[in-house]
Image: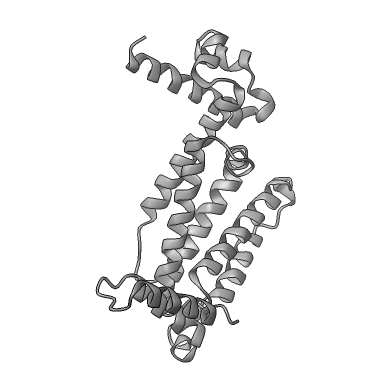
Amino acid sequence: MPTSTRATTRDRIVRAATDLLSAGGRAAVSTRSVSTAAGVQPPTIYRQFGDMDGLLDAVATQAFEDYLRDKRDLGETGDPVDDLRRSWDLHVDFGLTKPMFYTLGYGGPGDEKASTLRAEALERLTGMVARVAAAGRLTMSVERATALIHANGLGLVLSQIAIPPADRDPRLPAVARELVLSSITTGPTEAAGDVPSQATALRVALGNHPGNPLSPTEAALLDDWLRRLADTN
């Protein structure tokens, strides 16, 4: 079978499984229902994906690719803290509007490509936090702030998915967002005399400085000192 035909068949199966998952949840995605919707024989699914778990991994991967594209399209503004705010809102929206895809993507290890996409999402978050740090507005290390945002965002979405939509507090995601942001950032003027913020800003600046005169050993020691100062709060 030509490569283009295989790709078309694979895409048709993924699209059929995606539509079934959106309409009826995990229980609606079976070998019979997917093969009927995609217009293929059941063995074709196993040849393409190995088993149904492989197919669901492919569905989750496609959803993550769409999510990351939206993340990239957010772009950057002159306010790195507000950029974090917009990123949080996009993450929550993805989880609450596509709960089955979100739990597929974050609920297990998934395949190699899905893991790579999750790593890219975390890398993009780290980069956004580093921009806040470079502006002197981060009250802790980039690593700790990134982990805090990721854990709170993931926990919020998963906990909300477990609640029937009609019973959710629609303001909770925004309240949680502002609590997290207020705990890791300062205002532009407040950061001037804040040691953790300045330590984090210097650490990021040194990491981006191509002409760093320190030896690797000195640079590693200074990086450790600055990280510890950043996380004194």
Please state the horizontal and vertical placement of residue 104, each as a whole percent of the image. Answer: 60, 38
Q: Which image quadrant: the N terminus?
A: top left
Model colouring: one colour
Viewer-closest of 197 and 174: 197
Q: Position of residue 66 (x, y in %)?
A: 44, 41
Q: Residue at x 57, y 62 (%)?
A: 147
At 68% from the left edge and 46% from the top edge, which residue is drawn?
A: 161
Is 164 left or right of 130, judged from the image as shown? right
Q: Quadrant of the C terminus?
A: bottom right
User: Residue at the location (42% across, 48% down)?
Assistant: 70
Relative depth, front residue between 221 and 166: 221
| Image vertical order of residue 14 relative to residue 148, above or below | above
Whether residue 134 can be seen here: no
In the rendered structure, the answer to whether residue 196 lies left or right of residue 27 reads left
Residue 46 coordinates in the image, percent (x, y): 55, 15
Percent across and percent down for residue 202 are 39, 80
Q: Residue furthest left?
A: 211
- Residue visible at 49% across and 76% down in the picture: 224
